[in-house]
Image (cartoon, grey):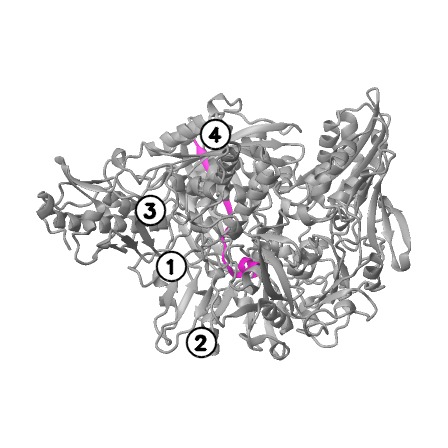
Amino acid sequence: MQPFDLQVPRSLEDALALLPKERSYDGAQLIAGGQDILTVMKNDIAAPTALVELDGLVPGEIEDDGTGGLVLGATATIQEIADSGLVRERFPSLAEAAKSIASPQIRSRATVGGNLHQRPRCPYFRHSGVSCFKKGGNVCLAEFGFNKYAAILGGGPSYFSHPSDMATALIGVGASVEIAGADGATRTVALDEYYVLPDEALDRETVLGANEAVTRIVVPAPAAGVRTTYLKFKERESYDFALAAASVSVVLDGGKVASAKVVLGGVATKPWPSPEAEAALVGQEMGPDAWRAAGEAAVADAVPLDMNGYKLHLVKGVLFRALESLV
Amino acid sequence: MTEPTQADGAHPRPGDTTADASPGRTELSRRSFLVGAGGVAAAGHALGSGQDAVGSGGASATETLSGTVDLELRVNGQAKKVAVEPRTTLLSALRDRLEPALTGTKIVCDMGSCGACTVLVDGKPTYSCLTLAAQCRGKEITTVEGFGSPEELSDVQDAFCEKDGMMCGFCTPGFVVATHAALDRKPDATLDEIKYELSGNLCRCGTYPHVFEAARAAQARRSGGEGK
Amino acid sequence: MANSNNGAADPTWGPRKDLDVLNRDDLRRIDGPDKTTGRAVYTHDVRLPGMVWAKLVRYPRARGTVKNVDVEAARGLPGVVHAAAVREAGETIAFSGSDSVVALVAGETPEAAEDAARAVVVEVEALAPVVTADQARADGAPVVRQRRRRPPKDNFSGLRENGEPDEVLEAVAGAAAQVDVTVEIPTQHHVCLETHGHVVQPGEDGEPPVLYASTQLVSVLGQQVDDAHGKPRVLTPHMGGGFGSKFSFGLEGKLAYELAHELGRPVHLMLSRSDEFTMGGNRSGSWQRLRLGADAEGTLTALHLEAEKHGGMGGGAHAGAPYHYEVENVASSIQSLHTATDANRAMRAPGHPQASFGMETAVDGIAYQLGMDPLELRKKNLTSPTHHRQLDRVAQEIGWNDHPNRVAPGKADGGVHVGIGFGVAGWGPGSRKCQVDVTVEPDGGVVSATATQDLGTGARTYVAAIVAEELGLGIDQVTARIGDNELPPSVPSGGSVTTGSSAPAVKHAAHLAREALEAKLEPVLEAPVGSYTWKGGRVSVTSDPERSLAWREVCALLASPLRVTGETQKSLYHGRIHGAQAAKVEVDTLTGRVRVLKMVAMQDQGLPLNRMALRSQINGGMIQALSYALLEQRVFDAQDGYLLSDSLDTYRIAGSREMPELVAIIDDDDERDAVSGMAEAPIIPGQSAIANAIYNACGARLTRMPFTPDNVLEAIHGKV
């Protein structure tokens, strides 16, 4: 890592005032758990001249919102989410997603806010010697190079697959983020509108401004009778990012699917809601035919690269197995 | 896609880091100082610029740690003074900065992937390579040395010896700390849960089954009241 | 020396039932307390007064021409004590590996060294990378290995042909059953958790230089070092894994050694993880086409093998054909295909896992084609009764006899299926001469000393245990000293030779010590040498146990320390072991995900010195094979030649949740009164057994490693 100053502000407002208005390679950045930003800095993807400590300035509690939903403080750790009785009871898919993340050591420090803002894991992006679109260069070496782990949806001009499990799971339960900005301004953005595609912006993965911070994640009460799961396929079960993951919710009416919510992870340049898969499920008998149809619909628009065509099967497989588990 | 017949010679490609070394290339505005072998010149930041806190804007209450700073860390129950930079990881502070060095905590991947550097911070298992020493101000740090000594092994350390939970031993301190954390967290963990709680630690020699046996043995001793 | 007495006899390991220290299931490693408490000092942990932190600067791609290496900016940075180019303008960087190192820097702190490395400006004109086999094979590909005499025309070398290919192919074509299979095996890395490197204390004032080295050859490492500053002392108290990759002082050693003497300060130069993947060695990849024929009864009749060894700038390794199986008519053509990548090094059983994967795949194919039990077909074509015994036992342990798919595989029908597969191994562990000193002090202290290194095998423990056994002591009464080249010479730890070399020498030394002590006892207990029993800390006359002395009383008879030197004795080691493995897997044929449920390995070894450490070693072989099978793959960017798998995130090795139930069976029917090493054999057949188990589960033949969902789904559905 390059040298930097560690700023320890007394308030969130002070913290945000220390951040630049525009993103840059060496602009100051926030650090909470630090489990992604420090790897980004070690890989020389960014070299902030200052890190601004968020410790104690942003809530970390997991709270009942009084209406059956939850409010997650952005600095709640992944382990706290996995362990929370409230989360497990109301949103088992969030607990499953949290449990699937990295390792105990990462989970004990990484925050849910940080998880939503992880930078890509593409090996080209992470390689300190390589330039790419996402690092201000003008090529995506993965497009014609090693793209086994790359996106099959939402790709171009960059093809990384978005790594956040919590984002996929939180979109699956209709969550929003509360954002604090400069001068005390706050705004709320639905998570399914929070992420941007590479053809919209290359220097970031979200609509968050360079001098803003997510403070809370608001999860509305689940629909009555909804069944939800988060299923993640990893190459290495011990500790890995998703090859393919899915947050799947269904409400059944008799044997039929009354409503469905499908969000895919690990296969697109952002967490990928699939209204196509949902449409294929709704009104159908909850069974293998509908599960297969949902898989086909989910990848109908996918464009695999040379080495990641297997993800077409994997998406179908993860949806099938996730839906199967909800019976 | 490969182009194996590509002729020898410069292979300039926009955004290609090697080509960036040639003068006059400006595509990388954001990283215009990017050079050669992944190298980046010290980005206009004053290296070793002074000691201790300086207010960033005069009026601000923000504390700034800059250059080389003297920290007090609580390691294995003792207050230790150590001079670090803000960028110094806890791992490096323990191994390379403390006098005498605490080298039981190992450096293997230096990227939060292997667990050899696992320590407890306020009781929680933590990759010390992905934690800044300065983030640990006021926190209780426990390293492998803090659990026991060769003369007085902790129950987990003794169980690792009993079950041959080590070969080359380079991953062992991390596994010992992670096992302590796992058993504290889940005293009645099943074998699958032990595997899950130890999934942030890698071993290359292949000691896993004996590590699991050691964890089970330590667990049994605790439930039987034999733990130290 | 005292072995000239009448009663003297050659040492033997003796009846197993009489052993108190050796061949036990509960013998603890003597360095366990140091390793588990973090007190064991590895090279990476050495801290010396005035030590500087050195770091290599690498060109991140494969091939290029150096235009400039500018270290001026680096030299001006605070805390930087050294920055110098090691490559000059105009020089060619021929491959990704040690050749990529362009500069060496050092600082007062690790951060200062990092700053210096970052500030070195490197200009290299890139050349076509030639990092993949396809690139290396292509017509007109740049030739990556240059030779002054007879420059090669292409990237192939070392063609070795055996047999009559036309005849063999004709025999295969006419056989009742035929398999024609092509397998591809990626390059594997050793992934030593402690990277390669040294801490060098320069020689000065007549004191020799001291090399703290993470090495597999403590005794002879010094021979690789320029001795202008005196013959170096080499110290390796502990080392964090080698697996065959640590036989060389290396560029990193040479640079650290020179820098330490230039600065007159100790230098710490350990490779970074990325350096380690780039220049720390590998197991060569492989491409093989096997055409195998068998008669209707399943007897293998003809085998044709074409193989490429992908060892980068090295020759690569392949153990040849047929691998363990008897085949009447064999022809093979094996050659190296070079890429501009780090040369392969020895890695646990070099060439054997590759050969096993090809052969076991083909043999398995024949069995199913004939509708025969693959276990029975294997036995039919293996001559060693040891292999038969071991296959039967692992089959029993894994549940083969109750398994439904014994002659036909399951189906890839979208369901989750369980399968079982097999593979066999073999190794000649060998032995080379080494020496051990045993010293007995008048106060009862015992030291067993030899230069050898403990890679994690438990060598340090048997250096003490064998002496304790011979003298009837507890292991805690014997001090083992190893890892120091001033101790009696030992062997480089390669090819499983260490145990077969060191242990007999320890035994011999202990035996000489015992005889020397018995000579001292002769006037006291009035019995000749060779007529004593040493047990439980006492010596007694075998024929009259009443006549006895405690250990301390025996030692008190010594006027001065007794020191004897033992040497490797042929009668105490043997050179041939076998091995069989079985794997049980679960395949989700919908998603291509493979989980290994259970692995069983059985190994013969002669006398097990330490059964618990032996099981650790066998488990380690199975686990490395499982990791190789399921996860490991070196990846280069073919376009620009970047090594993409240069971290433990991008080069995956198996973790705790990949662990199946592992059963390591020690073959106690092997009654040889001799010892052998166990590093190589158990790593050989695991990936073959797993691939065969996947086929058995679902009928998908995995010919390309690793068996990740992409490759499994391709085997099921074809390329998408």
Where, quadrant-wise, is the N terminus of chain C in this rendering? Answer: bottom left
Between the residue at mark 4 and the residue at mark 3, the CA separation in whole angstroms equals: 53 Å
* In-front residue for pair B4/A228: A228
Instruction: Confirm whether the magenta stretch covers residue A237.
Output: no
Q: Earlier in the sequence, mark 2 or mark 1?
A: 1
Crowd around label 4: few <14 · some 14–19 · many ≥20 (10 Å): many
Between the residue at mark 2 and the residue at mark 4, the CA separation in whole angstroms equals: 63 Å
* In-front residue for pair A176/B21: A176
Chain designation of label 3: C
At numbered mark 3, what does the secondary structure look like: helix, strand or loop? helix
Residue A304 percent coordinates (x, y) = 74, 46
Q: Which residue is mark 3?
A: C476
In the image, residue A161 sits, relative to residue A135, either above or below, namely: above
Classify residue C107 as left or right of residue C667.
right
Q: Earlier in the sequence, mark 3 or mark 2?
A: 2
Chain designation of label 1: C
Amino acid beneath label 4: Ala
Q: Which mark is residue C217?
A: 1
Classify residue B147 as left or right of residue A164.
left
Amino acid beneath label 3: Asp
Q: Nearer the viewer, mark 3 or mark 2?
A: 3
Chain designation of label 4: C
Q: Are marks 3 and 1 on the same chain?
A: yes
Between the residue at mark 3 and the residue at mark 1, the CA separation in whole angstroms equals: 27 Å
Q: Which residue is mark 2?
A: C261
Whether label 4 touches label 3, CB < 8 Å: no
Amino acid beneath label 1: Leu
Whether label 2 touches label 4, CB < 8 Å: no
Q: Which residue is mark 4?
A: C367
Between the residue at mark 1 and the residue at mark 4, the CA separation in whole angstroms equals: 44 Å
Q: Nearer the viewer, mark 2 or mark 4?
A: 2
